[in-house]
Each structure stands twice: as C-alpha cells, then as structure tokens.
Image (spheres, helix red, strand yellow):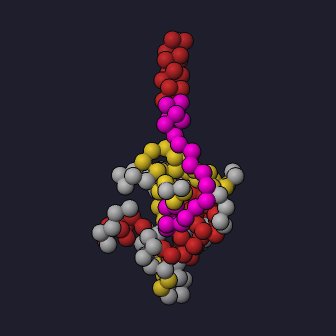
Amino acid sequence: MNRCLIFIIFFLYSSFHFANLANSKEINGKVRIVDGDTVEINNHMIRLIGIDAFEIKQECFKKDNTKYKCGEQSALILATIISNQPINCTAEKKDRYKRWLATCYIGKLDINENMVLYGYAFSYMSNKYKNSEKEAKKVKAGAWSGKFIYPWEWRKSNKIGK
C-alpha cells in the first residue's frame, strides 16, 4: 500500500474518532434511578448504552418457577452498584426519547457492563458487552438462573417503547 493511501485512511479514521469525542458530553453527579438501564443526573435523562434491562413492570420466573418482579430487581441492582455515589457518564448522542446514550462509571468501574454481569441486563445493539453476557449466562447470574423474556420482546408484546 502506498504512503499516500495509508495517510488518507489514517486521516479519515482520526477525523471520525475525534469528531465523535468532540460530540461527547460528560455528565457527572448524584443519580436518581429510573429503571435498570436509565438514570437521571442534574435533570439529564441518561440511557445506559449497549445494554437493555428488564422493564419496571416486567416479571420473570425463578428456578423453582415462582414469579418475581425482575424489572424492580434490575433497578435495585443498579441502585446497589451505584450505592448513592456520584457517577461519571460519557454521553455520545441522544435517542428518540431525548435521553443521553452513555457509558457510566464509578471510578473505572463500567456500570453498564456490571448490570450485564449481574444478570439483570443484556448486551443490546452492540457487541461491547457480549462476553460479559456469556459469562453471566454461564454462571447463571441473576435472571439467567430462571426463565425470562428478553426486555425488547416483552416491550413488543406489551406495546411499550423504550
């Protein structure tokens, strides 16, 4: 490959990468939990990008086939992870509901990934958390220990948008 072509590819990649960084927004502070994949910080609604968690009204089944409120459990797990600490979110863009789509952290801990590892959220519209989901499934973490309907399927059958 000639040097000119390599330079053009590098330039285009760098331009795209830095343009995305320039468009990102840092949102930091104390959190109000909305559900297992949505929080509010300083009047900014933030949807945890790359994951989908059970809806608040969604129910699942434990290993012994008893019903439980996995949507409420998902929100509780998120609250437990955050544990009333301020968080830092790197927002990329807004979704159709005008929520920021963001990866959120406590220090270096990726909150989005931890929701998947705990088994109360799933990798969604991205491969970023696929390995974490496989690990959670393997060890039967959270909802993986019983039966459930994926949140996106539950929303479809219950006519609910995300």
Between 1 and 55, the one lying in front of the other is 55
Where residue 89 appears, as percent x and y from the top left, is 58, 50
- Stretch in magenta: 18-39
Q: Is residue 111 visible?
A: yes
Determine whether, in the image, residue 118 is placed left or right of residue 95: right
Residue 133 to residue 19: above or below: below
Residue visible at 49% across and 37% down in the picture: 23
Q: Is residue 20 magenta?
A: yes
Residue 68 to residue 156: above or below: below
Determine whether, in the image, residue 157 is placed left or right of residue 16: left
Between 62 and 31, the one lying in front of the other is 31
Between 84 and 149, the one lying in front of the other is 84
Quadrant, the C terminus? bottom left
Where residue 8 appears, as percent x and y from the top left, is 49, 17
Where residue 96 appears, as percent x and y from the top left, is 35, 52
Q: Is residue 19 magenta?
A: yes
Residue visible at 52% across and 78% down in the picture: 146
Residue 94 to residue 74: above or below: above
